[in-house]
Amino acid sequence: MKVMQVVEMKGRLEEKIRALEKEKSVLMDEVKELREVVELNEKAKVLESEVSKLKAEVKALRDRLPLEFVQEIGEFTSSFLDESEAEDLGEKCSGCEESE
């Protein structure tokens, strides 16, 4: 009778160990995913802060320029963006042809 009890105990403990190992694996996967989300969130906050500071610096510098220079810079920036957008579109279209 005692041997049967030991065998049953051993079986229950082995089953408990398998269940705990499975739960541990699931929890470790969840921890990994959550850490990645936290890291990405922190990186996004840092970048938002940097962008905000840069925007404020650009505004402060433009405010220090004479109005005529600000208008010239605005025209240059607009034409520069138009050229960049056209180049981007050209690259996208050539990329579309390659994928087909």
Image (cartoon, rainbow, N blue to C red):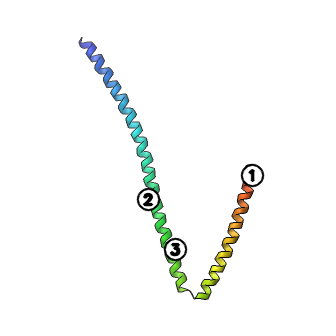
Name the spot of residue 73 as percent of width and height, x first. 63, 81
Whether the residues at callouts 1 and 3 have beta carbons within 8 Å, the answer is: no
Residue at disc 2, secondary structure: helix
Residue farthest left in this picture = 2
Q: Is residue 37 left or right of residue 2?
A: right
Q: Is residue 73 left or right of residue 41?
A: right
Circle 1: is it few (<14), some (14-19), or many (20+) Cα within 10 Å? few
User: What residue is drawn where x is 51% and y is 73%?
Assistant: 54
The residue at which mark 3 appears reads as 55
Real-space Cα separation, disc 2 to disc 3, in angstroms: 20 Å
Q: Is residue 55 above or below residue 21?
A: below
Residue at disc 1, secondary structure: helix
Q: What amino acid is labelled 3 in the image?
A: Lys
The residue at which mark 2 appears reads as 42
Q: Is residue 76 left or right of residue 22?
A: right
Q: What amino acid is labelled 2 in the image?
A: Glu
Q: Earlier in the sequence, mark 1 or mark 3?
A: 3
Q: Nearer the viewer, residue 10 or 81?
A: 81
Name the spot of residue 17 as percent of width and height, x first. 34, 29
Q: Quadrant of residue 10?
A: top left
User: What residue is drawn where x is 48% and y is 68%?
Assistant: 50
Real-space Cα separation, disc 1 to disc 2, in angstroms: 37 Å
User: What residue is drawn where x is 64% and y is 76%?
Assistant: 77
The residue at which mark 1 appears reads as 98
Q: Earlier in the sequence, mark 2 or mark 3?
A: 2
Q: Quadrant of residue 80?
A: bottom right
Name the spot of residue 1 as percent of width and height, x first. 24, 11
